[in-house]
Image (cartoon, rainbow, N blue to C red):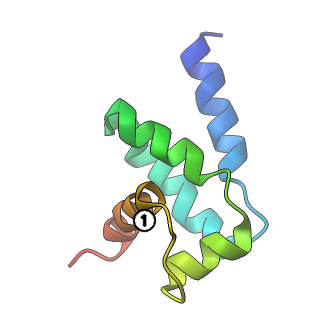
């Protein structure tokens, strides 16, 4: 197994959250969009996955805004995929 495959498997595992609402956002994004992201956005996604589920839920539902501009960027990228304007 290549390092790239190991990394993808690890990310797939990290995308499995304790909340279905997050699972349905993260898993398709990882499968469909992550490979096309540039290295900086891929790293932003990895960092976003380190956040706590309640914070992520609040950000995705629009109840609050992340302090980190990198987190905010990834939230917007993910939401734009499921809620195109």
- Look at 53% across and 77% down and name the residue there: 59
Q: Residue furthest left?
A: 85
Tell me where residue 6 sits by quadrant.
Answer: top right
Instruction: Name the spot of residue 22 as percent of width and height, x first.
Output: 62, 68
Q: Residue furthest bottom?
A: 63
Tell me where residue 8 sits by quadrant.
Answer: top right
Q: Residue furthest right?
A: 18
Q: How many marks?
A: 1
Q: Is residue 15 above or below residue 60?
A: above
Q: Residues within 10 Å of mark 1 (few under 14, many from 20)?
A: some
Going by the image, does 85 lie left or right of 52? left
- Look at 70% across and 46% down and name the residue there: 14
Which quadrant, please, contains the N terminus? top right
Which quadrant, please, contains the C terminus? bottom left
Instruction: Name the spot of residue 57 as percent of width and height, x first.
Output: 62, 77
Going by the image, does 53 lie left or right of 4? right
Q: Which residue is the site of mark 1?
A: 72
Q: Residue furthest front?
A: 67
Going by the image, does 11 lie left or right of 62? right
Q: Is residue 43 above or below residue 73?
A: above
Instruction: Name the spot of residue 84 as percent of width and height, x first.
Output: 25, 74
Q: Is residue 34 above or below residue 17?
A: above
Q: Is residue 56 above or below residue 34?
A: below
- Look at 36% across and 67% down and name the residue there: 76
- Look at 73% across and 61% down and name the residue there: 17
> In front: 45, or 64?
64
Helix, strand or loop for disc 1: helix
């Amino acid at each position: 197994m290549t390092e790239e495959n190991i990394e993808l498997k690890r990310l797939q595992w990290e995308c499995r959250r304790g909340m279905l609402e997050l699972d349905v956002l993260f898993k398709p994004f990882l499968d469909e969009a992550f490979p096309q992201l540039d290295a900086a956005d891929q790293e932003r996604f990895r960092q976003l996955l380190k956040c706590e589920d309640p914070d992520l839920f609040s950000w995705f539902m629009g109840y609050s805004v992340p302090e980190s501009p990198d987190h905010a960027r990834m939230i917007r990228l993910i939401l734009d995929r499921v809620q195109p304007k």
